Amino acid sequence: MTKVKVLIVEDDVWQAEQYKRILEKNNYDTEISPHALDAIDRIDNYNPDVILMDILLTGSTAFALMNELQSYSDTSEKPVIICSSVGENLDIENLKKYGVKKILDKAVMHPEDLVAAIRSVS
Amino acid sequence: MSVRQGKGFDPNIDIDGGLSSVVAAAHELKSPLVLVRQLSLMLEAGDVSSSETQKILQQITLTSEKALRLTSDLTKVARLEDAMFNLEPLNPQQLCEDIVTELKPLFDAHGKDFMLASRKHPLLLVANRDLLRRIIMNFTDNALNYTGDNGSVEIQIKALNAGKTIRLGVRDFGPALSSDLWSSLRDKLSKAPQNIHARPLSSGLGLYISSQFAEAMEGNIGVIRHRNGATFYIDLQASHQLSLL
């Protein structure tokens, strides 16, 4: 069976590794992008099923990346999950237009929350 | 009843400035705490190999140490005005070698290199050892975050202004600072913590702390933009003790 592919866009290396660890234990295929520019390059080749991203990224914010994704028909439908330490301040209704399906708050989430969120959108 | 209030509760404090400092400190401390919590949950759940367990434990230790350095710096800044700091001639080469040794495990764990550019001739500057050490540690933590995979960070020591000034710089090889960020950084280095948008892992708090420590030593901090990163530096007065020998 083909694994669901998750692109992790996170500039904290150890945090990104942690997501990868959790997801690969649950049989997901993952790749890590440390910043938005790398993510834009990687999306074409990797063609992820889900994009998991932090809202604050080195070089440019997640909003720049999400705008870019919305600009192309083949990427505009990719489900986006925001995983952020400022998650409590974000409103899902305002982010739906960027393809955001779920918001996770890093400060309170458990590993199973991450898996459940990805399962719900893939 | 007369109650002596601490600096943080001074009724004359600029509320917005005070609050933004607290928010910046809270934000800066939140990231390592979040990571430590998540790594701990992973261990708690079990089903982790012994090599992976060792790696996670090391990440918890190093992340906690980084957060503790910040709390220690914040305490120091809060007491800066009341404290006396001895300024003494010191050899920055030795100080920087000690920092490289201390932070090497952190860089190794990130797969990055950390070195001190060698110098033929020793230089002496006038500083407080503890404050200078904290500034270089702050610059180094910042550089670690923004240096790319398998990259390196280098501490450089230079004499400027015909030997009257000694510059200690920490060079990273991360994303270039945008022109806007560059100009705003220069303006804001000595002001309240500012969000540095192109480098969001940092709230600017580390730079603010460093600028306060530098001021206490009559030094200046600054940043040089490179095509592939930045050098954060502190300029301090050279000691003339060597010339007397």
Image: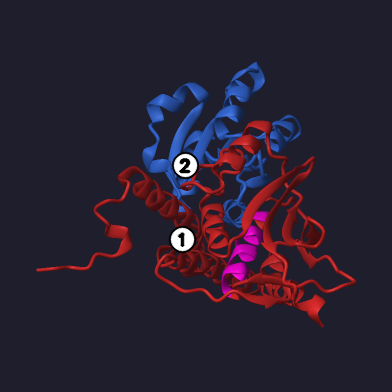
Chain colours: A blue, B red
Quarter of the picture containing the C terminus of chain A is top right
Check disc 1 and report the residue beneath it. B33
- Badge number at residue B17: none
Query: Measuring 56% from the left and 44% from the top, which residue is drawn there?
Result: B200
Relative depth, front residue between A121 and B13: B13
Q: Viewer-proximal residue, B102 or B231?
A: B231
Q: Chain of mark 2?
A: A
Q: For mark 1, give the secondary structure.
A: helix
Q: Position of residue B65 (x, y in %)?
A: 54, 70
- Toward the left, the furthest residue is B1
| Range drawn in magenta | B130-143
Residue A87: x %, y % from top left: 42, 42
Q: Position of residue B132 (x, y in %)?
A: 62, 68
Mark 2 belongs to which amino acid? Ala
> Label 1 sits on what residue type?
Leu
Does residue A109 appear in this view?
no
Predominant SS of the magenta segment: helix
Position of the N terminus of chain A, as image quadrant, is top right
In the displayed structure, B79 sits above or below B13; it is below
| Within-10-Å neighbours for mark 2: few <14, some 14–19, many 20+ | some
Q: Which residue is mark 2?
A: A117
Label 1: how many Cα within 10 Å (few below 14, some 14–19, many 20+) = some
Residue B138 among magenta residues: yes
Give me the C-alpha separation between circle 2 and circle 1. Answer: 22 Å
Question: Which residue is rendered at x = 66% and y = 20% of the image?
Answer: A74
Q: Residue furthest front?
A: B244
State the image coordinates of residue A43 (x, y, percent, origin top left).
70, 32
